[in-house]
């Protein structure tokens, strides 16, 4: 555990220290696109934050290769090298897209090639645990197609959710933390060395996100861009593929019995990792809804719009920071709820806890719909937005709001973002001016 924590800290430190110089480089290189209609930030912000994250990944792998215990991962498995090869390719494509805005189909092709590179070096799904059947061995083509599909889906799920400051990095960090705890339990508790690469990938992924978050929290000084979002999506998918499709379920030896029974008992363990979409359920839901919405309108599934989950949170009245924390909450609830269920699926307390926290999340989600008013005796204690307005003042405010035009997509009173161009207000005449 000490070596994993050291690797995490080194990765976070390198990412954090390099993000500042990368920001200056992005400004000089002109990687500051104009504000688009779907953006929620007010001023042009440099991209290319994925450069710092990639070098953090390289530093984490380099440090782990020189540690006493983690060096065995590189000796017994080729998966770290496969991850580095695929990450380098997807990172290069992301850098080009951040600078030159390459076509979506070209990016999709690059994602498939990066997944293929990892498959060629051994990072692939070999078998799947199927309930009531057992471990089903996959042919080379079946394993390759399934691996490529998982990588592409995960990359685009993370890329689609990268729309608010700190959102993608924070959600992936939460998923990586839950993934690390699960993989470490499989490696340490059951003595399965095949789970060591996935544990290392999760620790490095947490370091990449934690090192970048201080620069990316609202108001963000730099964006990770596609070079960062696609990179962390690929690392997360690589860990899930490593631990799901290459560990024999019967090796867990949960009890003495047949392999079919062992697989049936370990379904709660493998379902959250068979498809990494369960760990990142919120980005996956956003991805599916975006594809359905755009296809229904006759648009390309990769066409940008303003219908993502974080856009809707802003539209119903949440501020930028509150929308991000709500997404964090749901990601943590689903990720750690799945983790707890995989440890003890028979505990009713886990189910009740998840249900209770889900109710709290729904209340927080619908909070802008309800504006509670404090009683008269507490008017001077609570914040101004909870105080009762005088009837005349309330009518004046309502009349002013009706007269003031609101741009399409702009959040309500609690929204903290301007989604349209700034209004051109005529300058006041200076004293003594002839105009």
Image (cartoon, helix red, strand yellow):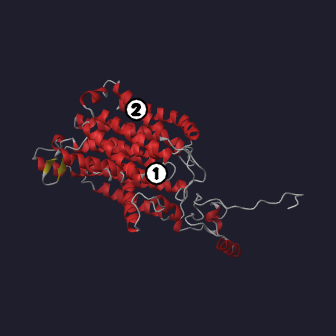
| Residue in the image at 44% along x and 34% along y | 56
| Residue in the image at 24% along x and 29% along y | 76
**First-in-chain label (2 vs 1):** 2
| Disc 2 and disc 1 in contact, CB within 8 angstroms | no
State which quadrant residue 228 falls in.
top left
Q: Could you tell whether 429 is left or right of 190 in the image?
A: right
State which quadrant residue 435 falls in.
bottom right
Q: Residues within 10 Å of mark 1 (few under 14, many from 20)?
A: many
Tell me the quadrant of the picture where the N terminus can be found. Answer: top left
Residue designated by label 2 = 58
State which quadrant residue 59 falls in.
top left
Q: Residues within 10 Å of mark 2 (few under 14, many from 20)?
A: some
Q: What secondary structure is marked by label 1?
A: loop
Q: How far is the residue under mark 2 from the one under mark 1?
A: 23 Å
Of residues 91 and 287, the one drawn nearer to the viewer in this rendering: 91
Position of residue 173 relative to residue 133, above or below, is: above
Q: What secondary structure is marked by label 2?
A: helix
Furthest residue toward left: 258
Residue designated by label 1 = 162
For the question of whether residue 2 can be seen, the reply is no
| Residue in the image at 42% along x and 49% along y | 171
């Amino acid at each position: 555990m000490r070596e994993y924590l050291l690797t995490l800290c080194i990765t976070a430190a390198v990412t954090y220290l390099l993000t500042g110089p990368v920001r200056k480089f992005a400004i000089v290189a002109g990687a500051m696109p104009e504000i688009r209609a779907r953006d929620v930030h007010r001023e042009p912000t440099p991209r290319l934050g994925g450069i710092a994250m990639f070098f953090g990944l390289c530093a984490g792998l380099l440090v782990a290769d020189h540690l006493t215990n983690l060096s065995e991962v590189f000796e017994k498995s080729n998966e770290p090298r496969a991850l580095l090869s695929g990450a380098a390719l997807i990172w290069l494509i992301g850098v080009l897209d951040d600078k030159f805005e390459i076509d979506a189909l070209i990016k999709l092709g690059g994602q498939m090639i990066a997944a293929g590179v990892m498959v060629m070096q051994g990072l692939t799904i070999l078998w799947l645990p199927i309930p009531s059947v057992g471990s089903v061995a996959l042919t080379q083509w079946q394993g390759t197609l399934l691996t490529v599909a998982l990588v592409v889906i995960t990359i685009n799920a993370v890329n689609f959710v990268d729309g608010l400051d700190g959102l993608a990095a924070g959600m992936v960090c939460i998923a990586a933390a839950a993934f690390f705890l699960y993989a470490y339990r499989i490696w340490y508790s059951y003595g399965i060395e095949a789970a060591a690469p996935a544990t290392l990938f999760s620790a490095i992924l947490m370091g990449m996100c934690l090192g970048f978050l201080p620069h990316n929290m609202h108001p963000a000084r730099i964006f990770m861009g596609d070079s960062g979002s696609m990179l962390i999506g690929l690392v997360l998918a690589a860990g899930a593929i490593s631990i799901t499709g290459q560990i024999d379920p019967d090796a867990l030896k949960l009890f003495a019995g047949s392999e079919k029974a062992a697989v049936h008992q370990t379904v709660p363990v493998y379902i959250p990792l068979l498809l990494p979409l369960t760990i990142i359920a919120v980005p996956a839901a956003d991805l599916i809804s975006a594809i359905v919405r755009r296809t229904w309108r006759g648009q390309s599934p990769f066409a940008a719009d303003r219908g993502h989950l974080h856009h809707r949170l802003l539209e119903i009245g949440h501020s930028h920071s509150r929308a991000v924390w709500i997404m964090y909450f749901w990601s943590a609830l689903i990720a750690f709820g799945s983790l707890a269920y995989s440890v003890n699926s028979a505990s009713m307390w886990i189910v009740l806890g998840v249900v209770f926290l889900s109710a709290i999340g729904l209340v927080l989600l619908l909070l802008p719909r309800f504006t509670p008013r404090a009683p008269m005796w507490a008017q001077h204690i609570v914040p101004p937005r909870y105080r009762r307005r005088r009837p005349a003042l309330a009518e004046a405010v309502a009349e002013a709001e009706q007269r003031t035009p609101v741009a399409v997509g702009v959040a309500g009173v609690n929204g903290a973002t301007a989604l349209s161009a700034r209004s051109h207000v005529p300058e006041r005449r200076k004293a003594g001016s002839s105009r």
